[in-house]
Amino acid sequence: MSAERFDTIIVGARCAGASLAVHLARAGQSVLLLDAARLPSDQPMSTHFISPLGVSWLDELGVGAEVRSMSPPSKVLRLDLLGTALDVPFARDRAGHCLRRLHLDRLLQEAAVGAGASLRDRTKVVGVIRENGRVVGVEGGEGERAHTTYRANLVVGADGRHSTVAQLVGAKEYLGYDNPRFGYWAYWRAKPAWKTDPELAPFDAYIGFFPDHVIRFVFQTDSDLLCIGAMPLMADLPSWKGRHEEKYLEALRAAPVTAKLTDGHRFEGKLLGLLAARYGFHEAVGPGFALVGDAGLHKDPTPGFGITDALRDARNLARAIVAGGELAMQRYWRQRDVDSIDLFHFARDLADPGYVSPLNRLVYERARKSPAVLARLSAQADREISPYEVVPRGTVMRWVLGAALRGRLSVVPSLFATGRRNARVERARQKRRALVP
Ligand SMILES: Cc1cc2nc3c(=O)[nH]c(=O)nc-3n(C[C@H](O)[C@H](O)[C@H](O)COP(=O)(O)OP(=O)(O)OC[C@H]3O[C@@H](n4cnc5c(N)ncnc54)[C@H](O)[C@@H]3O)c2cc1C
């Protein structure tokens, strides 16, 4: 039997793959969207936060209104370092949303089918077909259809952090590293205190850094549920073994915000966990293939930008595919790296135990009182400026000098460490920029 032919085959039908399918089908392409999972179904490896920028791309895809109607707005993110809190409102009164992936992915899959893409779930891709060194199709399926072949001008891997397509095409990893943390999270029915307690009411999302080096987070999802989690360092993993639920509850109850939300309460459903992950970039294009979403770039999820960036890169990849030609595809790859490199490093910095430093403590204390810095934090939360540009260098120097003169000398060594790290990021940024054709 001859293989079915398409302009583009996309492997993986969630936020990266389904949104790419919408763009391409709208541009008139014949698109086959394959997914190993039975759909619609949940993507449990997510805490669901979509930034305001991501929500505006969901508007473009035609699902923004439903996302807004199904999940409450998150207008203020609280960053809490050792009890010093920065409440960061998104710029221009914009809001993020945290619709659970069960719903978000379904909306995107429906939009893809509505735009004309063919969606086949329970179709696991196990091989790529090559001709003259170029990928020209895939092989996959389930049961009787286990070895079905599909051919296309381009095969896109949107199949997540353990991408089969990336492995099959031999896309090389760069800047890779292993997650220094593990994490557990669960869904808790929001107590009335969530919106009435004066300590909790000012914010809608929360990330906290503590002396025990366990990061705690709270995101409000749909259906009055809060996603509440703890991310300890890998060194703590042995002590959590076999006691993960007890340790998770202990970790939440040891910090004020998560304690208020969970004391005397019980989470719903299962406790979810991520015990190991590797972050890094993969070569995003090659002969007959491209990668998008986590398949091509997997970054530490602490700042909550995997979905937003998957939507961004799907949009840019669609433009490159429609424009056609090697140069457009190379540009897509290299621009993705330029757009991502700062946040990639910043996500790594946040997860590093060194983030809880005397210098960052000083920065949080001073930033609270600086409307200019708070405004820049808002702009950063909406990806308008780099996380490394939030506090201008001269301002940091002034704050450090002032603190040192008052005897707070502990900030000085961490200033040097931060300076060295920021210089490394600057070099990485310049290197990525130089590669854009
Ligand atoms: C604990 C955790 C919390 C996170 N929280 C957030 C957050 O709050 N905000 C945020 O923006 N990001 C978050 N992220 C990151 C976010 O979940 C990912 O960036 C996002 O899911 C990437 O989407 P994707 O479409 O690339 O891949 P995925 O969502 O992983 O989808 C890949 C799809 O490919 C399919 N597939 C895999 N292999 C095959 C195959 N061989 N054949 C066919 N189909 C296949 C899978 O079935 C799956 O449906 C979090 C991640 C983790 C781990």
Image (spheres, rainbow, N blue to C red):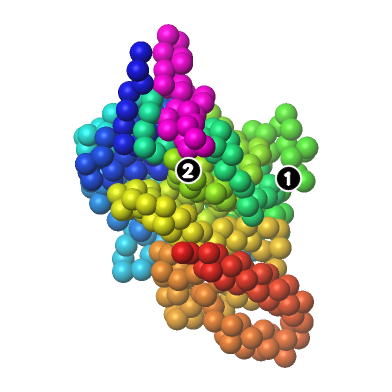
Q: Distance between the residues labelled 1 and 2?
A: 38 Å
Relative horizontal placement of residue 236, taking residue 153 as reference (left or right): right
Relative horizontal placement of residue 88, taking residue 31 as reference (left or right): right
Residue annotated with mark 1 = 234
Ligand 1 within 8 Å, label 1 CB: no
Q: Which residue lies furthest to the top in this view?
A: 144
Residue nearer the viewer, 113 or 64: 113
Residue 40 vs 358, above or below: the answer is: above
Q: What element carries label 1?
A: helix
Which residue shows up at 53% across the image and 69% down it?
434
Tag 1 and tag 2, C-beta contact below 8 Å: no
Image: magenta residue range = 122-149
Relative horizontal placement of residue 365, taking residue 323 as reference (left or right): right
**Tag 2: amino acid:** Pro
The earlier-in-sequence mark between 1 and 2 is 1
Q: Which residue lies furthest to the front in this view?
A: 132
Image coords of residue 87 (percent x, y): 47, 66
Q: Is residue 78 at least partly visible in the picture?
A: no
Which residue shows up at 25% across the image and 51% down it?
60
Q: Is residue 295 at least partly visible in the picture?
A: yes
Image coords of residue 125 (percent x, y): 48, 26
**Tag 1: amino acid:** Met
Image coords of residue 14 (percent x, y): 40, 37
Residue nearer the viewer, 68 or 385: 385
| Image mark count | 2
Residue 354 vs 419, above or below: the answer is: above
Q: Which quadrant is home to the N terminus?
A: top left
Main secondary structure found in the magenta portion = strand
Residue nearer the viewer, 58 or 93: 58
Residue 312 vs 239, above or below: the answer is: below
Residue annotated with mark 2 = 287
